Image (spheres, coloured by chain):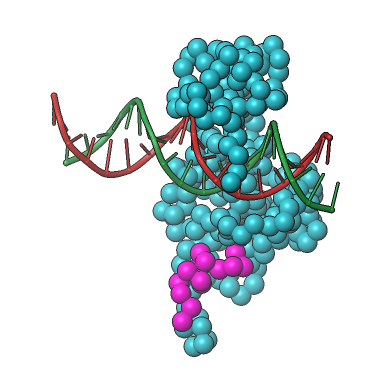
Chain colours: A cyan, B red, C green
DNA sequence: AAGTGGCACAACCGCCTCGTC
DNA sequence: TGACGAGGCGGTTGTGCCACT
């Protein structure tokens, strides 16, 4: 039985009051972030440390950019999601002033639906259409297996845990790379609406400085992805 | 005006990772 | 090297608001 992260009894839950916010802000202003477990007591808050951290990171931090997402930001989220999957903190890290929670919420409430409406599977960024297969042996394959369910896709929502975050990123990067390659070349690409693919502006995918390694993706580490992403241009999707 | 369905977003929960001992 | 604790992360839920009937 796992120990609870904090004492459940005597702690407030639910929406934060103005007084609580102010206490948290004041405390962090004077003592800085960190040691979240002891913070509530020290700050005079009847809250779980995790709750304080979340409140600060997602709402109270002074550098938070609030308001609607711009088109550029939306494009970037889609692009990063194609590469990283549901790694919201990494995605948010590329969007100054945005939090992982905000990005996650925006994805789930806006972008996901938008992609679905456009016939794109938001999990793997592929067109969600059933491509008929000539091979009769594959007749029993479900539609899901031919589109959204394919294990060779990005499958951003996979529940299968991988050993380390680097491994995960390596895995995703290579999967993303295969998708990008699939969609921009090869015989199957004729079935895709290329206007909707996740594409990088010309001159090209492979030539882009910093990108080849990412695209090929075999030995890409998290840090390399971070570095490479700095060179990524804005998506042309939805333009 | 009341009911209700959808949406947006804040917050919680539980698992994972990483650092320390 | 394994155990443990703290922080981080992603999935999910709760709730308030708004538009529509």
Q: Residue at x 67, y 13 (%)?
A: A29
Q: Quadrant of residue A31?
A: top right
Most common SS among magenta residues: loop
Q: Is residue B12 above or below residue A127?
A: above
Residue A104, magenta (yes or no)? no
Residue A118 percent coordinates (x, y): 44, 55
Q: Is residue A219 above or below residue A67?
A: below
Q: Is residue A112 above or below residue A97?
A: below
What span is colored magenta in the figure? A140-154
Left or right, residue B12 beside residue A42:
left
> Is residue A76 in view from this perspective?
no
> Is residue A7 in view from this perspective?
yes
Residue A150, magenta (yes or no)? yes
Camera-nearest residue between A8 and A87:
A8
Q: Residue at x 61, y 14 (%)?
A: A43
Q: Residue at x 72, y 50 (%)?
A: A165
Left or right, residue A197 beside residue A213:
left
Q: Residue at x 68, y 57 (%)?
A: A162
Camera-nearest residue between A226 and A4:
A4
Residue A13 percent coordinates (x, y): 47, 27
Residue A155 percent coordinates (x, y): 58, 60
């Amino acid at each position: 039985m796992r120990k609870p992260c904090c004492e459940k009894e005597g702690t407030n839950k639910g929406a934060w009051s103005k007084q609580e916010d102010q206490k948290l802000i004041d405390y962090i202003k004077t003592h800085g972030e960190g040691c979240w477990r002891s913070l509530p007591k020290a700050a005079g808050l009847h809250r779980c440390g995790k709750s304080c951290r979340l409140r600060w990171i997602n709402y109270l931090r002074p550098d938070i950019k609030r308001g609607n997402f711009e088109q550029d930001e939306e494009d970037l989220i889609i692009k990063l999601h194609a590469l990283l999957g549901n790694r919201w903190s990494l995605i948010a890290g590329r969007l100054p002033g945005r939090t992982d929670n905000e990005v996650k919420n925006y994805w789930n409430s806006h972008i996901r639906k938008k992609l679905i409406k456009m016939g794109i599977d938001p999990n793997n960024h592929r067109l969600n259409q059933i491509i008929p297969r000539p091979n009769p042996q594959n007749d029993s394959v479900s539609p899901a297996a031919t589109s959204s369910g394919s294990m060779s896709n990005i499958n951003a929502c996979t529940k299968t845990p991988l050993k380390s975050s680097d491994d995960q990123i390596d895995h995703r990067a290579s999967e993303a790379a295969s998708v990008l390659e699939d969609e921009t070349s090869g015989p199957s690409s004729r079935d895709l609406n290329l206007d909707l693919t996740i594409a990088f502006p010309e001159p090209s995918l492979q030539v882009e400085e910093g990108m080849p390694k990412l695209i090929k993706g075999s030995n890409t580490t998290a840090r390399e992805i971070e570095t490479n992403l700095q060179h990524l241009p804005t998506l042309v999707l939805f333009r």
